[in-house]
């Protein structure tokens, strides 16, 4: 498993390229949501003002009265149409981003594999011998991802619309100033509307990342004869979750999918080349340069360690009450896929 500095640099470059795709998609979706809300907000506010202006007694209107408010219902129907259009935008933008993520995942594998071969070999010649991705590979992964995106986003607009209607029924304190009440309710409606954006971004980023990893697996499967498996590679930053820290450096069978991280997990699947002597190269492997996760974590500042673990989990780890591997646990989800998530502090301290 002769992972080199070049290997790590190529993995980091592929991760950065995917990050650019994710961030561009996030900006596009966020901009679309903001534009849509800006087009709805005034009509909703005027409808709320009109509804509250007719009230006596200062209480929030009943469900029946809200349902009879024609202008408000028209504004809510406009919001529902906007959410449907935004959901379609999520599907198209995520499918486009997934294609780029798949291209990055497939095309990076030959170089990453070649970087683990002896430097004396003609790496250019080796690269030409490694199996590269085809348009068929790319199209198949994008098609599967698009199907999943369509399925996951199907309830998006309906759920956001329902959340807006629930907020209306819940109401706000009207008091002596219906104008302030209308604006307070508008803020609540905006929060419900933007809940759709939060879910959309989570779905989009997670599915693009999974497509990237599926593409990496396809590229590795195509060169299985020179590989022994793959290595879970985390970014190991203060924003990396405890489960990803714990899984970093673990070695997995080539046929095992993954990394199966939590939603929006950015961990990479690094191919592990077989020992050189198994490949007919009469040389000993050099030491692997994959950073040790525990050593890297312990070299961080205390503030960064706390940002990663939180005080309870870090105290348990410092006392030696748990092993490093205890920080991650597998969660099976019949509606999604298995994922490795941080073990709850309560389980660690029993």
Image (tube, rainbow, N blue to C red):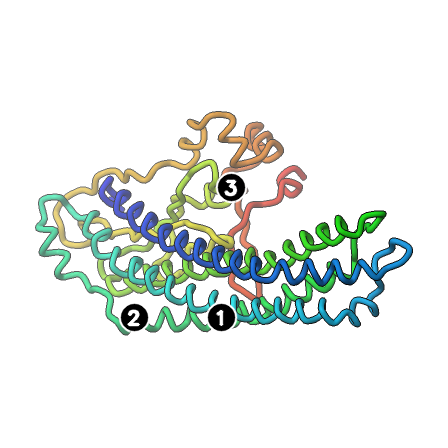
Where residue 272 sits: x, y (%)? Answer: 29, 51
Residue depicted at 49% across the width and 70% down the height: 88
Q: Name the residue tied to disc 2.
A: 137
Give percent across and percent down for residue 168: 75, 60
Q: Which residue is mark 3?
A: 242
Judged left or right of residue 204, residue 321 is: right
- Is residue 304 depicted above or below 272 in this figure? above
Between 326 and 168, the one nearer to me in the picture: 168
The residues bearing labels 2 and 3 have C-alpha atoms spaced at a distance of 33 Å
Q: Position of residue 159 (x, y in %)?
A: 64, 66
> Is disc 3 in contact with disc 1, using a CB cutoff of under 8 Å?
no
Q: Which residue matches tag 1?
A: 88
Res. 86 in view:
yes
Residue appearing at x 57%, y 59% in the figure = 37
Dot 1 crowding, Cα within 10 Å, few <14, some 14–19, many 20+: some
Instruction: Determine whether the residue tagged by mark 2 lies in a helix, strand or loop.
Output: helix
């Amino acid at each position: 498993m002769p992972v080199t500095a070049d290997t790590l640099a190529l993995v980091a470059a592929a991760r950065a390229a995917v990050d650019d795709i994710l961030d561009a998609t996030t900006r596009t979706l966020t901009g679309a949501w903001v534009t849509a809300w800006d087009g709805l907000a005034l009509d909703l506010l005027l409808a709320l003002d009109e509804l509250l202006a007719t009230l006596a007694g200062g209480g929030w209107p009943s469900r029946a009265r809200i349902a009879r408010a024609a202008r408000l219902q028209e504004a809510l129907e406009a919001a529902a149409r906007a959410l449907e259009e935004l959901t379609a935008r999520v599907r198209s933008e995520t499918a486009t981003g997934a294609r780029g993520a798949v291209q990055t995942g497939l095309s990076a594998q030959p170089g990453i594999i070649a970087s683990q071969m002896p430097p004396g070999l003609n790496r250019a010649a080796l690269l030409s011998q490694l199996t590269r991705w085809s348009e068929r590979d790319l199209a198949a992964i994008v098609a599967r991802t698009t199907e999943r995106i369509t399925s996951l986003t199907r309830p998006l607009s309906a759920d956001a619309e329902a959340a807006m209607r629930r907020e209306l029924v819940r109401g706000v304190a009207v008091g002596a100033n219906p104008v302030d009440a209308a604006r307070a309710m508008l803020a609540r409606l905006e929060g419900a509307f933007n809940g759709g954006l939060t879910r959309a971004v989570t779905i989009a980023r997670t599915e693009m990342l999974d497509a990237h990893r599926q593409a990496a697996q396809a590229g590795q499967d195509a060169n299985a004869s020179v590989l022994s498996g793959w290595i879970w590679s985390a970014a190991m930053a203060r924003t990396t979750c405890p489960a990803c820290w714990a899984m970093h450096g673990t070695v997995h069978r080539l046929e095992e999918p993954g990394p199966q991280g939590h939603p929006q997990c950015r961990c990479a699947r690094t191919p592990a080349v077989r020992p050189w002597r198994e490949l007919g190269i009469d040389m000993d492997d050099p030491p692997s340069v994959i950073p040790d996760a525990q050593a890297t974590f312990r070299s961080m500042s205390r503030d960064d360690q706390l940002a990663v673990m939180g005080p309870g989990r870090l105290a348990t780890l410092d006392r030696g009450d748990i092993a490093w591997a205890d920080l991650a646990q597998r969660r099976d989800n019949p509606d999604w896929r298995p994922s490795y998530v941080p073990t709850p502090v309560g389980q660690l301290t029993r």
